Image (cartoon, rainbow, N blue to C red):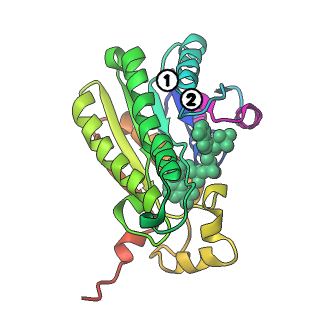
Amino acid sequence: MEIRLDGQVALVTGGSRGIGKAIARTLAEAGAQVMITSRKAEACEAAAREIGPNAHFEAGHIGRDEDAERVIEATLDRLGRIDVLVNNAATNPWAGPTIEVDRARWDKTFATNLTAPLFWTQRIWRRWMKENGGSVINIASVGGFATSPILGVYDITKAAMIHMTKQLAAELGPKVRVNALAPGLVKTDFARTLWEDGKGEQVAKAYPLERLGEVEDVAGAALFLAAETGRWITGQTWVLDGGGLCAYRSTA
Ligand SMILES: NC(=O)c1ccc[n+]([C@@H]2O[C@H](COP(=O)([O-])OP(=O)(O)OC[C@H]3O[C@@H](n4cnc5c(N)ncnc54)[C@H](OP(=O)(O)O)[C@@H]3O)[C@@H](O)[C@H]2O)c1
């Protein structure tokens, strides 16, 4: 079965590299017109050029309301609709125990990873999806289901995103479906400190499928959820981690 999105428009935050770029490419290859956004215009332009004529770009910081408005209005002006929103951009400015975090980095992590996805969704709901329907896909993390000695603050934002996914699914149906993807470790710039210097091989050994994720693993699931294939799925978070969460061994 070929999954198609012809005639549809998708907006992907953080679409200039990593998982977001793979999602943008996959949705574009399925026939969607895809708006890529991230802070750096040159990086967005390069990604759009690489993906081809179905890809477009408008740079913006997801945490700034004026940027959100400009990117969303540019998408509606140039492409006419927004059927799919992928809330993918995120940050992780603090690596250490949660109890030691400073207020500025706590606030920045929440502003980027949780507040921005809510208000991009709200804006697009009001401007298009409330009347016309659509699908929202939040990129969470397996960290939203676990604890970590160094990623606790980031993981708390992802746990909240998983709950926000359920909450918005309950509020926005039947017009709009809201789902999330929770990847395990994927070899991107964002996660470099977790996989470089052989650390990735150690993590992969703990995954039943014995490899780290590839950006395409996440993109394929996003396409399934965005398209007609996902039409009866809402409020769900799909864990994409090679079985890592299942491999936890009880010591009790
Ligand atoms: N990689 C993993 O192992 C992993 C695992 C679980 C979940 N995730 C999640 O997957 C998503 C994508 O991560 P990734 O690994 O693909 O990261 P990445 O390769 O570092 O890409 C991040 C993207 O977000 C953009 N971005 C960052 N801050 C932004 C901001 N404030 N406003 C607008 N755009 C911004 C970046 O572009 P600019 O620099 O141009 O802004 C870039 O396009 C994130 O939500 C992350 O939490 C990743």
Of labels 2 and 1, earlier in sequence is: 1
Residue 94 percent across, percent down from the top left? 55, 59
Range covered by the magenta-colored residues:
28-50
Measured along the vertical axis of the image, is residue 146 above or below residue 177? Answer: below
Instruction: Write down the residue under mark 2.
Output: 31
Residue 51 seen by the camera: yes
Please report contact status of discs 2 and 1: CB closer than 8 Å, yes or no: yes
Seen as rendered, the residue at the extreme bottom is 251
Foreground: 80 or 41?
41
Q: Secondary structure at mark 1?
A: loop
Instruction: Write down the residue under mark 1.
Output: 8
**x 32%, y 18%: residue:** 130
Residue 14 seen by the camera: no
On-image quarter of the N terminus = top left
Residue 188 percent across, percent down from the top left? 64, 57
Q: Amino acid at mark 2?
A: Gly
Q: Amino acid at mark 1?
A: Gln
Residue 6, magenta (yes or no): no
Q: Is residue 150 left or right of residue 28?
A: left
Q: Quadrant of residue 177?
A: top left
Q: Secondary structure at mark 2?
A: loop
Residue 28 percent across, percent down from the top left? 60, 33
**x 62%, y 62%: residue:** 187
Tally of numbered tags: 2
Residue 32, magenta (yes or no): yes
Foreground: 100 or 55?
100
Residue 11 percent across, percent down from the top left? 53, 29
